[in-house]
Each structure stands twice: as C-alpha cells, then as structure tokens.
Amino acid sequence: MTVAIYPGSFDPITNGHLDIATRAAKLFDKLVIGIYDTPNKPILFNTEERVELVKKSVINLPNIEVEAFSGLVVDFARKIGAQTMVRGLRMSADFDREFDMAMMNKKLNPDLELVCLMANLQYQFLSSSLLKEAASLGGNINNLVPEPVAIALSKKVQNKM
Ligand code: ADP
C-alpha cells in the first residue's frame, strides 16, 4: 500500500492546500495530512482547531486522514509508514525553502521520497498568512477557503482575531 504524508502548518487550510491534497490523494492509496503542532511562526488557530478545519474540508475524500504531529516530519513519516512526502510549490514563494528542507530531510531519512506538486495557477498567490491579513481587514475571502474555514475566520475576526 502506498502511503504519503502531506505536512504543513495549515493555519488555516486554504483552497490551494486542498487542491494539492485532492490531487495527491489520487496518486497514493492513502494520504495523511500532518498538522505541525508547533510551527516556527505565530499561529491563529490552535492545533485542535487546525485539525478540525482540515478534517471538515476533506470529508469527501475517503483516502485522506488527518493527524497532528510534533517533532521531525521524517520521524512522523516513519511512524505512519509513509514512503513519500508531498509538498506544494508556488512559482516564486517556495522553491528555495523547499529545496533546503528536502536536502535536510534526505539526510535525516534517505528512504523518504519527496514529490512536489505545482500549485495551480489560480492559487499561486494564495497563502495562509495573506489570507489572515485580508480577513482581519474585512476582506471577502470566501472563494479562497473551504466553507468551514470561512466561518471560523469570520468568528475570529468578530472576536478581533
Ligand atoms: P509550512 O509551514 O510547512 O510552509 P503551510 O501550511 O504554509 O505549511 O504549507 C504547507 C504546504 O502547502 C507547503 O508545501 C506549501 O508550499 C504548500 N502550499 C501553501 N499554499 C499553497 C497554495 N496556495 N497552493 C499550493 N500549495 C500551497
């Protein structure tokens, strides 16, 4: 059975993430979306909220599981029996960082293969951080995120995030 891990902060999950997950789910028997418990950046949604929002967003994709993890992604991949890691690549934003991380991960676990899927054109400029900024300033972000995320974001905005 082919198992892949799609790790990230997902703070919150966007339609760009969902597009990558949907496409990756067609390539593997099982895709585990791994939610970093403690990302190296300020977060808006706690781990439980991020897991919940991803679960609600992939409810129609039966071969996707969602799990929080802490520590090294390569260790989590080993634990769940994933042979492959999936990441999304936007045109300008991601390559250098992904390349560095890929080299480090290869050192840490040479058996874990990396598959990068190119972000679709309409999501090239979509990031969780810009999304949160736009939402906090009252922008309409409804067509950029799954519905449960739009609802959760508007609640955060009402509570002044
Ligand atoms: P991380 O903190 O690991 O960068 P993110 O949640 O920001 O976590 O992103 C997780 C993965 O999804 C990364 O591979 C990132 O490049 C990818 N990604 C982020 N936004 C998009 C998007 N709009 N389209 C496609 N892939 C994306």
Image (cartoon, rainbow, N blue to C red):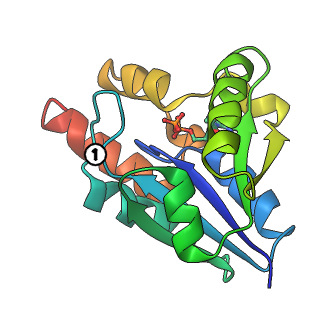
Q: Residues within 10 Å of mark 1 (few under 14, many from 20)?
A: some
Query: What is the quadrant of residue 6 in the picture?
Result: bottom right
Quadrant (top left/top right/bottom left/bottom right) for the C terminus: top left
Quadrant (top left/top right/bottom left/bottom right) for the N terminus: bottom right
Horizontally, residue 26 falls left or right of residue 78, namely right
Nearest the eye: 79 or 156: 79
Horizontally, residue 92 falls left or right of residue 69, namely right
Horizontally, residue 41 falls left or right of residue 84, namely left
Residue at image x 23%, y 34%? 157
Do we see residue 78 in this rendering? yes
Q: Position of residue 139 (x, y in %)?
A: 42, 23
Query: What is the quadrant of residue 132 in the picture?
Result: top left
Residue 116 to residue 50: above or below: above
Nearest the eye: 47 or 139: 47
The quadrant of the rendered image in which ligand 1 is seen is top right
Residue under circle 1?
A: 45
Query: What is the quadrant of residue 14 in the picture?
Result: top right
Q: Position of residue 81 (x, y in %)?
A: 63, 76
Label 1 element class: loop
Residue at image x 62%, y 34%? 104
Q: Position of residue 16 (x, y in %)?
A: 66, 41
Could you tell me the amino acid type at mark 1? Phe
Residue at image x 44%, y 55%? 35
Count of all numbered marks drawn on residues in the image: 1
Q: Position of residue 54 (x, y in %)?
A: 48, 61
Nearest the eye: 19 or 68: 68
